[in-house]
Image: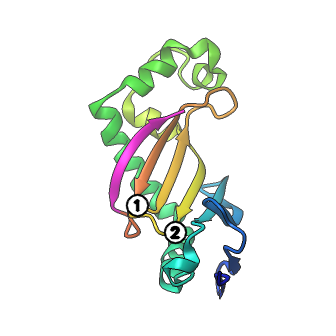
Amino acid sequence: MPVATLDHPFFGHCSTAGFTTEEVCWEKEIAVNGSGVDVALWAPPDAPMRNGLDKGELDQMADAVQHLTTLDEQARRHLLDYLDDDDAFIRHHLEEADAFPRVAELFPSGSTTPPDFAQALQLVQVGLWLGHPDPIVMDYMIDPDHSDQVLAVKLGADGSLASIDWES
């Protein structure tokens, strides 16, 4: 089986050698709006069967990493629309504020608005998924130290919204 390797100007040496599942082939903590965000580039095990790692796709992912602040702003606008349409994520955290100290601290009155909540969400992780139709996944949490609830904003390579999914 051929080894899929590529030296990329941004990601450096990338290889999927030995991958049996999708695995991280590059990761780094990057500052976005003053906070450290874990960014990981995921590659499938079948990259050699897909003619190896695609430099063009890697270039798109590198561009996304270099523009994370802009993508964060876009994602927050999408999150605001999502929370305006369905406030269940907000209500869940406010109703259980005793379990989420950051929520209690941010919203001591026990209420908030979707704009304030969307702004308070923390971008904790960005996954870049090679070979996926919506390769950029931005994970937002309100209290990462005490809650496993995530709003995952999934974007196309061009930054267009694919979906927002409530995950845990």
Magenta residues span 160-168
Identify the residue position indicated by label 2 in the image: 130
Answer whether residue 167 is magenta in the image: yes
Q: Is residue 72 left or right of residue 45?
A: left
* Residue displayed at 51% across by 84% down: 51
Question: Residue at (64%, 81%) from the top-left corner?
Answer: 4
Give the label on residue 134, or none. Answer: 1
Find residue 122 and report its image quarter.
top right
In-image side of 2 versus 108 (left or right): right
Q: Position of residue 21 (x, y in %)?
A: 62, 59
Q: Which residue is drawn at 65% across and 84% down?
A: 2
Mark 2: amino acid: Leu
Give how far across and how far down residue 150 sits, in percent. Answer: 52, 37
Q: Distance between the residues labelled 2 and 1?
A: 9 Å
Up the image or down, 13 lies above or below 120; here it is below
Identify the main secondary structure in magenta. Answer: strand
Q: Farthest residue in the front direction?
A: 1
User: In terms of secondary structure, where does tag 2 sit?
Assistant: loop
Q: How crowded is mark 1: few (under 14 residues within 10 Å), some or many (20 or more)?
A: many
Q: Taking the image as drawn, is residue 112 in sight? A: no
